[in-house]
Amino acid sequence: MMNDLVLRGGSVLTPEGVVVADVGVSNGVIAALGTTVGEGKTTLDVTGCWVGPALVDIHTHLREPGQEWKEDVESGSLAAAAGGFGAVVAMPNTMPAIDAGHLARFIRDRGREVGLVDVMPSGCITLGRAGISMSHIDDLWKAGVRIFTDDGDSVANSAVLRSAMEYISALGGVVSQHAVDPDLSSVGHMHEGSVSSRLGMYGIPHAADDITLARDLVLAEMTGVRYHVQHLSTANGVELVREAKRRGVAVTAEVSPHHMAFDHTAVATTDSNFKVMPPLRESSDRQALIAGLVEGIIDAVATDHAPHAALEKEVPFEEAPNGMLGLEWAASIAIGVAALTQEAFFDRMSIRPAAIASLPEHGQVLQVGTAATIVAVDPLHTWTPTTTFSKSRNAPYIGMELAGKVRHTLLRGVVTFSDTPIVAGQ
Amino acid sequence: MNHLLSTEHMPRDLIEAILDDSDEFGEVLTRPIPKVPALRGRTVATMFFEPSTRTRMSFEKAAKALSADTVTFSPSTSALSKGESLKDTALTVWAMGVDLMVVRHSSTGAPWRLAEWLDIPIINGGDGANQHPTQALLDCLTIRQRFGTLDGLHIAIVGDIKHSRVARSNVFAMATLGAEVTLVGPPTLLPVDVENWPVKATADLDAVLPTVDVVYLLRVQTERGGSSVFPSFSEYAERFGMSSERFAALRPESVVLHPGPINRGVEIGHDVADHERSLILAQVTNGVAVRMAVLFRLLGGDHDE
């Protein structure tokens, strides 16, 4: 049997668990899986690699439309494919904000034109992300939006949030919240603690995140909505999610790579690449987030890939915008810093994120007949990134030694990224 | 020393050497012609992105007393108001041929960025609420001239420590020079992790007054960071103001300092500011001498370490 492509010799995540096997791909689907899959027109040697469903990022800023000097769908898709992703959920805090169906369709269609990852638009909870009245939720829903968020801002008004939760709950959608109290965070630039105190910089206390999450969990329980908390940053947040899950609240949670890789001591240099929201917190928070991810209280690694141009970041810390890139190095942090097993890695970076985003074609363990949307990651390879596919460079990962490297990414049988030249035939 | 950015991690012998030099330059300032040719031909740029009159004038006076030329950047009349970035502004001024920049900026760390972007010495003239090292040096000089040393002195810094670059710079410099420092203020004005600072902290000013050699008063504002930090100026003055009654409770040799500008009747009593044991004007005079010492050390030649 001649396959279009064969992934040879990897540790493959299948319904029966991890097996060392070859994967034969033809016509965009997995045609054969095992030790006798036959030859391929193209063969990728993935010996030693973890092979499983391509990754899904439920928190990506592609900046299109409106801020294409930072990123656009094409450059963001290139970075996503290089990071092992088969699908990304685009955040709606663009200019204009994605608060109506035609805007969501634009994002989705731009993703299809580029064709490197499935770009799933998310939509605003409130019109213009202003936090006052509901966005065109039905219209967005018809355009395929399943995740609603005002990301970048929390929906601060409890009555507005409650109403949106009730409305979205009836549709079956997810309310995804940037859970940071605006009053406790508005003047802050970094975590409130020993480093902010030394620098004299206004800080953002743990409480800014925790009180918003605690309120949201009460409202989620009351309304029954599927609630997702973005970028957890505090140890207490992990405990709030644990307790809510124990009570049966339909809550999921994500952690960003940077909240696992860094803590507030990184800000001591006032390097604006470390300015993120919520801020990098204490070492004990970082450890609790990693432990929460390993344990599965935290469902997903989500990048919060947030491109900003050099001219925007080459300013004093307090004047810089929040955010850092993440797509290309998230897998490395999940492996090298969080030390996830292969099963946990694909669970937190593909299977559960795909379920949260309602992406049934993604996050499927590999078996004959499923879409060949696959990533091969070498968990042992150490490397030092020197560049990025993003239009921006706001990434402290550039120049850092990382463990774990994405080798190949496939989207429905098409190789969208490969870090080694592909030789036809053998 | 390539730059002067912070008093944190400044070695004691370096601070003392600068203070020694400052005493010498202070003598220069008392001469009939208070000027030496030490930095003739050198150009010092004062880059004050945040309004300041006193510090800028003090640096300019110091540079001129060393015969350096000065150029001045002020944001309101500059390309900054046309949207030019800090980096482009700094590179532009540097390209004109300046040998040193004194930088004041409302953002923490701005002088460090200039130190990265340019290969000339940078003096931090105050960044955010982070550091203002020449203020601390001139305060230490003023105290040392009065007491001979800071070793073993008990210094109370009173007021808005949390939002004060003057306090941050002084805490580290004074502790390095051997003083015991007590921060005095309500919890809203103390650093959040004060237990990790090389100081003691209290909200009870009256309890520390009998044991202090120096009371360092900070200027106060009622609003900080979008929220109120104490109920009213009158209540602040009642608990933390250096009234005549409190001044009388000090030991007879104890002195009062203030970085200015002072709010008479709030943090300092109307009469106290003019008392012989109020060293506020000596601080201002010493500011010029200290800045001469720092400029000379950074531009003048053979002090490199």
Image: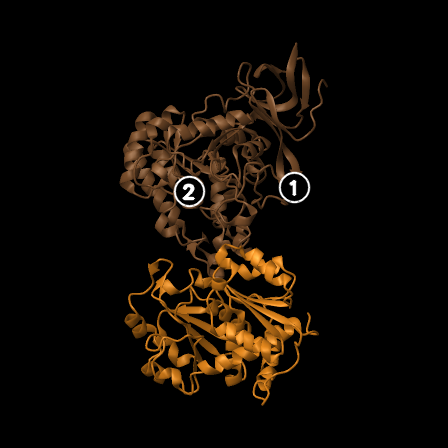
> Which residue corresponds to mark 2?
A152
Q: Amino acid at mark 2?
A: Gly
Residue B230 quadrant: bottom left
Relative horizontal placement of residue A281, taking residue A142 as reference (left or right): right
**Side of A226 where A47 appears, left or right:** right
Q: Determine which of the numbered discs, if any, sits on residue B209 in the image.
A: none
Instruction: Tell me the amino acid under the disc marked 1.
Output: Thr
Which of the two labelled residues, at mark 2 and mark 1, occupies the earlier sequence position?
A: 2
Q: Residue at x 35, y 44 (%)?
A: A212
Where is residue B75 drawn, in percent x and y?
A: 49, 62
Percent x, y for residue A145? Answer: 40, 28
Q: Colour of chain A?
A: brown
Disc 1 crowd, CA 10 A, few/some/many (<14, 14-19, 20+): few
Quarter residue A392 falls in: top right
The residue that mark 1 highlights is A384
Give the drawing colour for chain B.
orange
